[in-house]
Image (spheres, rainbow, N blue to C red):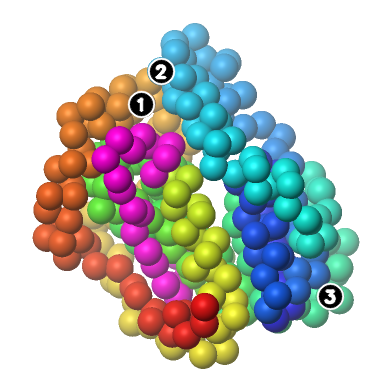
């Protein structure tokens, strides 16, 4: 399978593209790695009251380094990276280059919202990797807010066909986060990225076999968050929840809680090792 990857430049994105490109069944024609003009740390540092948020971001960066740095720094890079400015992926030169490459599939993870002709030309062959369980949580921080709201069952990843909306495409497959005693918000998220990368490899290899899945109806319970919602109080809440045995409580009633919020499971992705 010939693939184009659209992603970011953080360590987790480096791990992701190198892992996918390391598969013998997948040829990554190009990885477009989009640099950030400003990130959440930059925004947070400008605020006066920012101690809890900065501590959380530091813990996340350290955990990301622990999970991904060895692989990302020492694995051969077969992903053919091309580093671009934020938003450049929607410019004509990038669009023309992608079309001329004629990939079987395009994968988007951690890049700008895609607009324009790529959506129509590669309709049905353009996968968005959304860290969150749609349609329950959409927007920004979709695996942060379920933990704030004491809903660990709604932390996960959604693989979907991309469209013009925000996390609204047709869902291919979903998976929930795995938890262990002693977890932190950061270890939960990074373990999920590792699992996501493994599952995506199977989706790519078995893409032609995938079934069309019955979709969820969007309800009034669905929540959309923005970066501006990230506050000192939200960070205090998430760590208080962990101190109050959020994970242990969830694991003790996992089946019951999961059944309240069903997810889409496309079994055809498991037809390859």
Which of the image's four quarters has the N terminus? bottom right
Q: Residue placed at 25% from the left, 32% from the top?
A: 242
Q: Tag on residue 52?
A: 2
Within the magenta stretch, is there residue 173? yes
Dot 3 falls on a residue whose secondary structure is: helix
The residue where tag 1 is placed is 235
Q: Distance of mark 3 from mark 1, alpha carbons?
A: 43 Å
**Is residue 86 depicted above or below 106 in this figure?**
above
- For residue 135, which quarter of the picture? bottom left
- Which one is earlier in the sequence, the residue at label 1 or at label 2? 2
Task: Give residue 22's position: percent from left, percent from top.
Answer: 70, 65
- Please rate how many residues cluster around mark 2, counting C-alpha atoms within 10 Å: few if below 14, some from 14 to 19, many from 20: some
Give the residues in magenta.
166-188
Q: Tag on residue 101?
A: 3
Task: Give residue 193's position: percent from left, percent from top.
Answer: 50, 52
Q: Are marks 1 and 2 in contact (CB under 8 Å)?
A: yes
- Which one is earlier in the sequence, the residue at label 3 or at label 2? 2
């Amino acid at each position: 399978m010939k693939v184009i990857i659209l992603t970011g430049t953080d360590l987790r994105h480096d791990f992701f593209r190198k892992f996918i490109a390391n598969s013998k069944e997948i040829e990554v024609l190009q990885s477009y790695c989009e640099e950030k003009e400003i990130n959440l740390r930059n925004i947070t540092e400008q605020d006066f009251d920012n101690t809890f948020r900065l501590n959380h971001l530091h813990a996340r960066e350290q955990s990301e380094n622990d999970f991904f740095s060895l692989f990302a720094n020492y694995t051969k890079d077969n992903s053919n990276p091309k580093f671009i400015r934020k938003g450049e992926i929607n410019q004509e030169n990038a669009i023309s280059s992608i079309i001329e490459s004629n990939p079987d599939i395009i994968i988007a993870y951690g890049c700008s919202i895609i607009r324009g002709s790529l959506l129509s030309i590669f309709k049905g062959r353009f996968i968005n990797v959304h860290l969150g369980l749609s349609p329950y949580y959409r927007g920004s921080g979709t695996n942060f807010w379920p933990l704030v709201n004491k809903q660990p069952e709604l932390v996960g990843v959604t693989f979907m066909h991309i469209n013009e909306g925000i996390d609204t495409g047709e869902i291919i497959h979903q998976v929930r986060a795995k938890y262990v005693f002693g977890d932190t918000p950061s270890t939960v998220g990074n373990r999920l990225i590792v699992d996501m990368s493994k599952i995506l490899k199977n989706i790519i290899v078995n893409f032609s076999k995938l079934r069309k899945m019955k979709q969820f109806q969007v309800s009034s319970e669905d929540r959309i968050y923005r970066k501006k919602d990230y506050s000192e109080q939200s960070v205090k809440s998430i760590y208080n929840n962990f101190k109050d045995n959020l994970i242990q409580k969830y694991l003790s009633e996992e089946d019951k809680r999961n059944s309240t919020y069903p997810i889409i499971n496309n079994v055809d992705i498991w037809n390859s090792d």
